[in-house]
Image (cartoon, grey):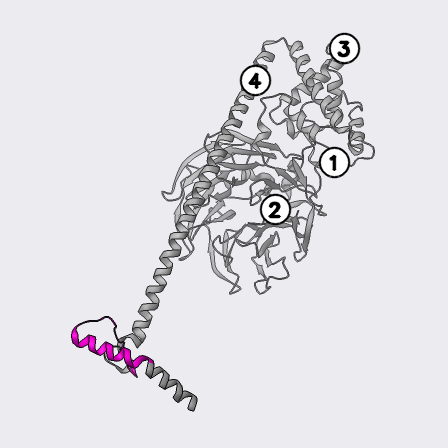
Amino acid sequence: MPYNLQSMRKWWSFFRPMAVISCKNVKTGHHGLVAIPYIKNPSLDPQFRVYFSKEWFDALHLSFRNFLSEVFNGTHILKVISTEKNTVKYLKDGIKQLNNKLSQLQALLETKEAEILYLQSLAPSDREASILKEINSISDLSSEASSKDDGVSSRVKDFREPVNDSLHIGEKITTTNCGESSSSTGVLDKSTVAKSSSMGGSVGQSPSEHEKSSNVLQMAHTENSIDVLGEEEFPEVKVDFQETFLGHTSRISRCRFSASGMNIASASVDGTVRIWTYDSSTPTSRNATIYCGAEIMSLDWECRSDRLLLIGTADGGIKAWNVDAKRVVCDLSTTTGFPSVLDLKCSPVEPIFVSAAASRWNGFHKLDKAGFASLTVWNMKTWKAMTVLPLGEDPPAITSLCFNHNGKILAASAADGMIHMFDMSAGLQITGWPAHDTAVSSLLFGPDETSIFSLGSDGKIFEWSLQNQGRVLWSRDCTRYCFPDSLKICRHEIALDSNGKRLLVTSGSVRSPIYQVSSFSCNVLFSFVSLILVVQGHTLGLRTLPHSGAITSVDWHPTLPIFITGSADHSVRVTSII
């Protein structure tokens, strides 16, 4: 306490003279030193009370916050401007490099076109000798490169094995390679390449050798020369995991992933549909068995959610199953004149779906005799028919449907081999073209929607350009799997993965092929391109693991490298590949 009193005295002795001087200055009008008034409770003073209110504090806080925000936003804009400048510079450099590469490719193309014109101007025998000479040089280069590896040198040795003289265009070429499995062979049998190469300097020596060289040349010039690989020689898929569902008691007719890929619906010809999941982490509350009382011919999930499943039957019924309520929310029927619902498709945007019904049904093997067609657009809110799409007088049955990404275009394939395109906003057909000589069994848009894939009942697969109508961008002959007898047990279909690079096809065999989709396979500018691919050992397809029966339905997961296969052995299998 004495210490505090002493401190106060010192403080007063220091400030007292200054206070006296300040008071004199105020009286005389001089303000050299300003005294700060002391208020004991400023929050109660009317003059200062506003600065202690909550409103003033909030206003100050907001103003300071806005100030800092403006400062930092200005800094961010500078960074964005700097980043955009760097991006523009990087893109300009990339464009420059691409232009240089384009110039090089154009020069190379002009050179090769000149070579083709030169070869076309030669006599047939001179032309074959020139091409064989080029093939010989390519084979020699490949042999020199592969001789550095002991594992590959054994395959180079197999190149020299004899070739069957009776080979013709389109036949599968196989030889017995000791110590090498069939799954490791290339696009064209390697022994054929080496044999044709070894004949480069002996053209015209004998009719048999000339015939063999002609066969090789014709295969090299064939539009689908790469397709001469037998699909049985595709390597098996590398499996990450696989699940098999054994709940059905008869042949599977359709199986589909839901929009999210979490649930699966599978149907069998005994009239039952089962909803299940392959992932143990997914709740099983939606699992159900639906009894329809007739053969299931079509399935489709609502595109905007996993809530509704549409089921089409052979007796003209269309059921809408709510997976959350676990009940049929609507049971529709087509007209009596069109009792078979061959396909159903939900719009990816609007609450509508389209049904393709046929006037009669005599089995999959008589798809071209399914009668007449009816395309009906249904409202999924009122569950009533909205309109019937025009198809002309007595139109052949519509076998498959698919929407584009925004639901404005509907593609429909017919039993007479035609593909029809409809404008859904106008409800009119806008174009169409003959795609197959037989009925089209499956149809789907390509990944960028500039093309469309079709599978005919004759086993031919085509990718059609939508920018240049009638032009084939890619094709495959899948008759080894989609042979006529297989139509007695299934209606073949195709499915594209989420990247649009792998095409899965149903099969009358226990395995299905997975084709690598590439329009490059149709590029036949150079007669020896396919043979180069053979030497380098590129893989153009894969094989699924075997079921114990024919594969009757296929589908891909909407986002993951996972596919589903339904089989005549009553099983449904989910396979995740690496």
Q: Magenta span covers which residues?
A: 14-41
Q: Is residue 66 left or right of residue 561?
A: left
Question: 373 or 378, which lies in front?
Answer: 378
- Above-or-below relation of 261 to 517: below
**Which residue in the protein does label 1 denote?**
184
**Which residue in the protein does label 3 denote?**
206
Disc with the residue nearer the chain's start (4 vs 1): 4
Label 4 and label 2: CA atoms lie apart by 45 Å
- Dot label at residue 111: 4
Q: Is residue 565 left or right of residue 408?
A: right
Label 4 and label 1: CA atoms lie apart by 35 Å
Label 1 and label 3: CA atoms lie apart by 34 Å
Disc with the residue nearer the chain's start (3 vs 2): 3
As shown in the figure, which amino acid type bears the numbered disc 1?
A: Ser
In the image, farthest residue toward the right: 178
Disc with the residue nearer the chain's start (1 vs 2): 1
